[in-house]
Image (cartoon, rainbow, N blue to C red):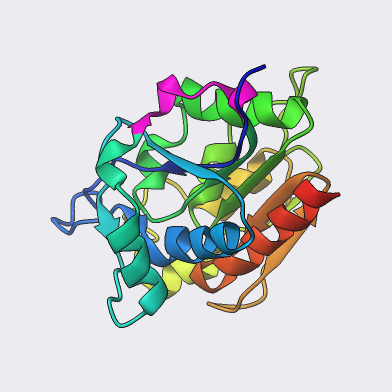
Amino acid sequence: MPRTTDVLFVLTSHGELGGTGRPTGFWLAEAAHPWQVFTAAGLAVEFVSIRGGRSPVDGADRSDPVQQAFLEQVDLAAAGPVESADPAGYRSVFYVGGHGAMWDFPGNPAVARLGTGIHAAGGVVAAVCHGPAGLLDVRRPDGSHLLAGADVTSFSNAEETEIGLQSVVPFLLQSALEQRGARHTDAGVFAPHVVVDGRLVTGQNPPSSAGVAREVIRLLAA
């Protein structure tokens, strides 16, 4: 019987913020805080990145002991490429945000295959902030979009505008989710907000990250 890991983290490999000349990547708190919640609960976690190996880090706050512990204890260089991950080996998938995900999550068949396969097998699909970009191509067994008719949240259009990147990102995530038929809600700019719809869990922004992990744990224990 194949080994099953509780949570697979998916990280971006994209490190350039459009044409701004500024770096981007995955937002460290959005991986570190869920990692801490999952591991404290005794869950086994693994990491993949889009191209394999170390992902570019954005938003690091080394005064945060959780982020510092993550950097010291997680070997990001050992992450396999997303294509190497078999959905049958995982109970849940966690799409980590950061602006890099807006470029290399959508349109990636392996990213979509993970969410599609894990959800179809009764597992949990989760994403936070810009991570829901990885949900845009996830489908149900009947071929319909998982997002169609689903209640979700993500980094909102208002938040993107607040930080002045609404014209830098390749698309507005909230709008793209809604175009897939999702019902998007938010709690206001940079307020924590987690939405659970069946076995789909989404968080609005970095302050929502740990809350997403707690909901995933609850669903896995059900």
85 is within the stretch colored magenta:
yes
Q: How many marks?
A: 0
Q: Position of residue 25 (x, y in %)?
A: 30, 52
- Residue 95 in view in this figure: yes
Residue at 59%, 38% (x, y): give it.
Answer: 135
Residue at 42%, 21% (x, y): give it.
Answer: 83
153 is within the stretch colored magenta:
no
- The answer to which of 35 and 163 lies nearer the viewer is 35
Residue 73 position (above or below residue 89): below
Residue at 39%, 56% (x, y): give it.
Answer: 98
Give, as a single range, the part of the protein colored magenta: 80-89
Q: Quadrant of residue 57?
A: bottom left
Mainly helix, strand or loop, the magenta region?
helix
Q: Is residue 29 left or right of residue 73?
A: right
Q: Position of residue 143 (x, y in %)?
A: 74, 18
Q: Quadrant of the N terminus?
A: top right
Q: Quadrant of residue 81?
A: top left
Q: Position of residue 163 (x, y in %)?
A: 37, 72
Residue 152 position (above or below residue 115): below
